[in-house]
Structures are given as C-alpha cells and as structure tokens.
Image (tube, rainbow, N blue to C red):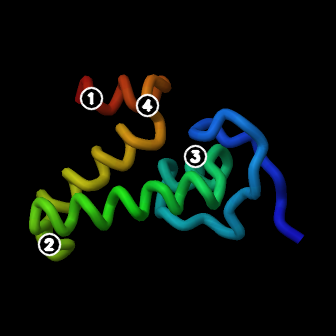
Amino acid sequence: MSKVIYCKFLKREAEGQDFQIYPGELGKKIFQDFSKEAWMQWQTKQTMLINEKKLSMVNADDRKFLEQKMIDFLFEDQELNRNKKDE
C-alpha cells in the first residue's frame, strides 16, 4: 500500500513516491513533499525541455540547467527555489 502525503506541488493529498528517485538532500525533499503525480508532470516537462533544447545528459552544463528547471518547476515560490537562484 502506498503512502499518502500532502503534495506541495499539487497543494493537496496524493500518493507519495515509493522510493527516493533523485539523489542527495534535494532528492529527500522531493521524496517527502512531492507526489507521484507531481513527479510525472515534471518528467513530461523534462522530456519536452530535453527535446526542444537538444540537451545531452552527458554534458554537465545541460544536467545543471535541467536540475535548476526541475527546482523551478517543483518548488515554485518555496524557500529552496529562492536560495538556489541566489547562488
């Protein structure tokens, strides 16, 4: 049985992730605060960005760009997003 969490992206209760899908502290926050549905929406957006911008996951700059877009997408106005943009 899957756990139900309050998804900060959807702003409602939804089915949580089965496991941590992204590494590190950021991955822990995603696992705790974002539902499967929110992650699927990000994956759709991610695929669109990769295709439109012709990103290569071998390229470190492209991976960094995509990670920032993920933070922008998932965290919107939350503290993590503001801190990341200041760096």
Q: Alpha-carbon distance for marks 1 and 4? A: 11 Å
Kind of residue at badge 4: Glu
Q: Alpha-carbon distance for marks 4 and 2? A: 25 Å
Kind of residue at badge 2: Ser
Give the quadrant of the C terminus: top left
Q: Residues within 10 Å of mark 2 (few under 14, many from 20)?
A: few
- In primary-sequence order, the first of circles 1 and 4 is 4
**Relative side of 81 to 68, left or right:** right
**Relative side of 11 to 79, left or right:** right
Looking at this view, is 87 or 5 the one in front? 5
- In primary-sequence order, the first of circles 4 and 2 is 2
Camera-near label (1 vs 4) is 4
At mark 3, the secondary structure is helix
Kind of residue at badge 1: Lys
Question: Where 80 sits versus 5, above or below?
Answer: above
* Residue 37: quarter of image: bottom right
Q: Alpha-carbon distance for marks 2 and 3? A: 25 Å
The percent position of residue 1, horizontal first and vertical second, equals 89, 71
Q: Residue at x 53, y 58 (%)?
A: 39
- In primary-sequence order, the first of circles 2 and 1 is 2
Q: Alpha-carbon distance for marks 3 and 4? A: 14 Å
Q: Which residue is mark 3?
A: 29
Q: Residues within 10 Å of mark 3 (few under 14, many from 20)?
A: some
Camera-near label (2 vs 3) is 2
The percent position of residue 61, horizontal first and vertical second, equals 12, 57
Q: Which residue is mark 1?
A: 85
